[in-house]
Image (tube, rainbow, N blue to C red):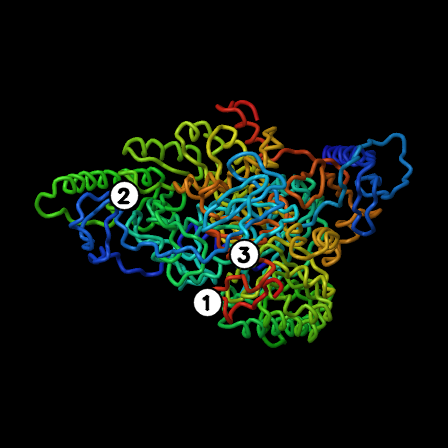
Amino acid sequence: MRIVVFAAALSVLACTPAKGSPTPSPKVAAAGDSAKPMKETKDTSMAGRGATSLPNADPFPSTYRPFPSKTTVIKNVTILTAAGPRITNGAILLKDGKIESVGASVTAPSDAVVIDGGGKFVTPGFIDVHSHLGVYAAPGVEASSDGNEATRPVTAYVWAEHSVWPQDPQFPRNLAGGITTLQVLPGSANLIGGRSVVLKVVPARTVQGMKFPGAKYGLKMACGENPKRVYGSKGGPQTRMGNVAGYRTAWIEAEQYRRKWDKWNAEHKGDPPARDLNLETLAEVLRGNILVHNHCYRADEMAQMIDIAHEFGYKIRAFHHGVEAYKIADLLAKEGIGAAIWADWGGFKMEALDGIRGNMALVNQAGAKTIVHSDDPSGSQRLNQEAAKGIEAGKELGIDISEDQAIKWLTINPAWALDLDSKIGSLEPGKDADVVLWSGDPFSVYTRAEKVWIDGAMLYDRDDVREQWRTDFDLGFVPQVGGAQ
Amino acid sequence: MKQSMNRALVVVALCAVASSLGAQTIAITGGKVYPVSGPPIEGGTVLIRNGKIAAVGKDIAIPSDVEKIDATGKWVTPGLVNSSTSVGLGDVGFSGGPRELGAKGHDGIAASFQVWLGYNTQSVMIAPAREGGVTSIMINPQGGLISGQAAIIDMSGALGLSDVVVKAPATMIAQIEDDDGAKVGAAGELLGKLRDLIEDTKAYSRRKADFERAQTRTFTATRSDLEAMIPVVEGREVLTIIADKASELQAAIALQKEFNLKVVIAGGAEAWMLADKIAAAKIPVLTGAMNNIPGSFNTLGSRQENAAMLRKAGVQVGIIGNAGGGDEDMFNVRNIRYEAGNAVAYGMSWDDALRAITLAPAEIYGVAGSVGSLKAGTEGNVVIWSGDPFEFASRAEQVFVRGKKIDTPSRQDMLAKRYKTLPPKYNTP
């Protein structure tokens, strides 16, 4: 029972900041010398100076390299491809980190490792677009509470990756749940909380070693109760109207900044304008280079956020936690905005009161993109179980969601939300070989992930403790309880 | 005169309700019946009369005037029992409405706090739980060293508290791992305080008259708290101790031995490490099967196999929600059946898992004569499932509480119906 209370407190923490740890007021970082402009940059003379506001500047580049892999065939399996109807009794070939072929049968090279799935299931690796792993690491102590820069309502200058602890023992547990890609976000204390980071769920010494190469950044925004609760007695916003004024004020500044910099980048006349980390991130949103992930529960607030996006000319990629998405599913479909939602969380605060299990199916039926997300290190390990609840709730409403459709909620739809759907999220030739072998139908309560591959490398095997990643923290602190040796 | 007329009317009205309920006899036939108190029965009959289970078996004589429900192809189980909830103690988790689950107490001790006095029998959280096949819940106070007294409730929808209480108090709740919550500096101090309280209760119980004359030493708790602790100290009332860490669990075992208490462990994240010791001490454990995160330094050994390993060692195991984050104790009390399914995925037998959310908690808290199984004489708490109750693709098709079929829609049903077609109509449900 204690554990329930404790864990619930943790999750609240993820959505809301812990109270009042004194944090020094943020300083604009000194210009480093590691900023490398990306291809879009026309002027290469700025390379390495980090003093200018260049589109897609990448000062903390990914150092991830795929782990060594063997050419692998998984055969005699039911394959949910997320790209079409299931293939029963099919096979899939993973080669050089990519999916080489998938179908009723594949031509197995002689050196291939062949796994006979014996009627088990294969799916793409799951993608959780709402995670706080690493930024709210386990154990949940104040010293590791790094998810909310709750010092002022707009902190677009913070980047989640600078809080990620790669030794968070929650990472390998997520991998064992079939999760291969995570978007780690700052918390929701702030109107604008900062940049997200997209990670491969892999062991690494540094966060750079986990960063998904080429993934865009996201911007975390939050509606409703959390910001006004946090800042109500700290200078505001104190109300929802104060929240909206806060977003608009920030975008007005960002637009000025973008124009100033775009002009200078085009003309290179005189000294470059002063760099501002906060506005730089926001300007990148306005340029379309950073995707907006907006924590927002209520339908009416989502509609207002859409109007704000129209006013300033940016796009909202997905609403997260939209427990009322079903009330405006038509609007989400029209705007092309994804709904990253839980199966059945609701009722835990006023803005969550109207959460219904039919949400996933109703959003799907309206033609908008349903995305199963977690916001929870435990729920993240069972996204398939959440989707299964969504299927059943649909059935009870007379909406028939096939497993072939529901698998998309966990794979290609979240991949789209991260603008990575050309690389991951479905089992098609040429895509990254992020693959999970399940002990049975992934929508059954009795099914567990048995083996997980990322870029063709098997990084988890439930049956072999030697193939199970243990973080530095796990060593000594956590008893080893893995599968057979 | 007028007053007695009114009283007479009330009596008549009550009789009318009672007899309309009483007259109802329901026969659920043809289903795969899991009585839990006995082996499963293919094509069995469950006969409910006067709100109670009248008979369960293969060849039950079915009276002619009964309401027959064909459950062919369905699974029939007792109503589920969730023994760790705060349903009805607040309607909204944390940003509004009353919260009736944490007493202030005195110095971390709130033994006299009876949580059910704040229970809302009409809470909107009841219908979702019942739709998930949960018919009985334990409502738990939280916080401090001694949180107070818990009760077991049937979710019949009746307004009157006395009409829904199965047992109150069902247990006293204590926690020995959060030193901060009880304003002490270390777990050892917390245990010392608990020991003081037990000794003081014994002394108080022997010397009540002296106490009234102020002729005793000063006790660590108030008179009402000491009074409430008497049945616990005498071993007549269960003391549920919330603890996760192996060291705390060993302290709980020692406490049970030293004072001959009736101890139940709740939480028990690291109980698997001590499975044999806990089994030998005959201490039941309430735990979940969906948490493997070292979420605190008290739960470093969390693993999903915990429940199964304890059961294998012979421990009486009740399953409670422990995934964390998903509101398992309020809005998602209904998910207890999935917790049981996950316990099976992590090594528990299916039968044990069903038992762990029905008869086991009922036995642990001494209400097996009322709930938790389909046995003649128990309350008519029955669920007809479309299939395996642990599976997501199954639903509770019909739920009976105390012999009455309840299909009151939840708020969520009404919202789904309203918004199924957009734009919604606001003048219909």
Circle 2 chain: A
Q: How many numbered tags mark residues here?
A: 3
Q: Of label 1 and label 2, which has the lower sequence position?
A: 2
Dot 3 corresponds to which residue?
A5
Q: Of label 3 and label 2, which has the lower sequence position?
A: 3
Name the foreground residue: B60 vs A260.
A260
Tell me the kind of residue under disc 1. Answer: Asp
Element marked by disc 3: helix
**Residue farthest toward the left in the current orientation of the protein:** A270
Dot 2 corresponds to which residue?
A282
The circle on residue A472 is 1
Labels 3 and 2 positioned on one and the same chain: yes
Q: CA distance from mark 1 to mark 2?
A: 36 Å
Q: Are marks 1 and 2 in contact (CB under 8 Å)?
A: no
Mark 3 or mark 2, which is nearer to you? Answer: 2
Label 2, residues with CA under 10 Å away: few <14, some 14-19, many ≥20: many
Left or right: residue B247 versus residue A148 is: right
Element marked by disc 2: helix
Tell me the kind of residue under disc 3. Answer: Val
Mark 1 or mark 2, which is nearer to you? Answer: 1
Q: Of label 1 and label 3, which has the lower sequence position?
A: 3
Residue A271 seen by the camera: yes
Tell me the kind of residue under disc 2. Answer: Leu
Q: CA distance from mark 1 to mark 3?
A: 27 Å
The N terminus of chain B sits in image quarter: top right
Element marked by disc 1: loop
The circle on residue A195 is none
Left or right: residue A422 versus residue A344 is: left
**Residue farthest toward the front in the current orientation of the protein:** A110
Name the foreground residue: B180 vs B164.
B180
Residue A226: give x, y in percent of width and height.
Answer: 40, 46
